Image (cartoon, grey):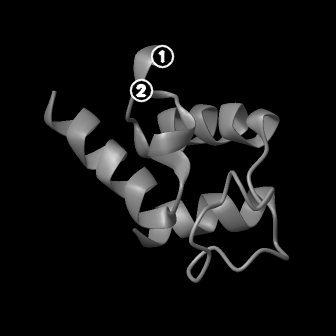
Amino acid sequence: MEELLEILRDLNADADFEHCENLVEEGILTSLEMVMLVSEINSRMGVRLPPEEIVPENFQTVQTIYDLICRCEED
């Protein structure tokens, strides 16, 4: 989880990722930042997120993103 938070902070140092209830709807995580986040997760964490999983529902909170990473690590 800490590595994910580090990646998110690298994308947007001013955002309060830990307390946000919907990163996408609140505009904290834009579609471009989602793409950059997926790329960083792949390169820094070694986890490939399938394209069909890159939907706003999986990027609502830090926890939903972390859950997605955990699911993809298992595959």
Please provide percent x and percent y for residue 66: 38, 56
Q: Nearer the viewer, residue 15 or 57?
A: 57
Task: Write down the quadrant of residue 15 in the picture.
Answer: bottom right
The local secondary structure at tag 2 comes to: helix
Residue 69, placed above or below residue 50: below
Residue at x-position 49% and y-position 64%: 62
Q: Which mark is residue 51?
A: 1
How far from the left and from the top, in percent, is residue 40?
Answer: 61, 40
Which mark is on residue 53?
2
* Foreground pick, 71 / 21: 21
- In the image, residue 20 sits, relative to residue 37, either above or below, namely below
The residue positioned 70% from the left and 80% from the top of the image is 16
Q: Which kind of residue does numbered mark 1 sit on? A: Pro
Q: Amino acid at mark 2?
A: Glu
Q: Looking at the rendering, in which quadrant would you find the C terminus? A: top left
Please tell me how crowded label 1 is: few (under 14), some (14-19), or many (20+) other residues with Cα within 10 Å. few
Q: Position of residue 64 (x, y in %)?
A: 40, 56
Is residue 25 in view from this perspective?
yes
**What is the x, y in percent for residue 49?**
42, 28
Q: Which mark is residue 65?
A: none
Query: Residue reaching furthest front?
Result: 25
The residue at the point 39 percent across, 68 percent down is: 1
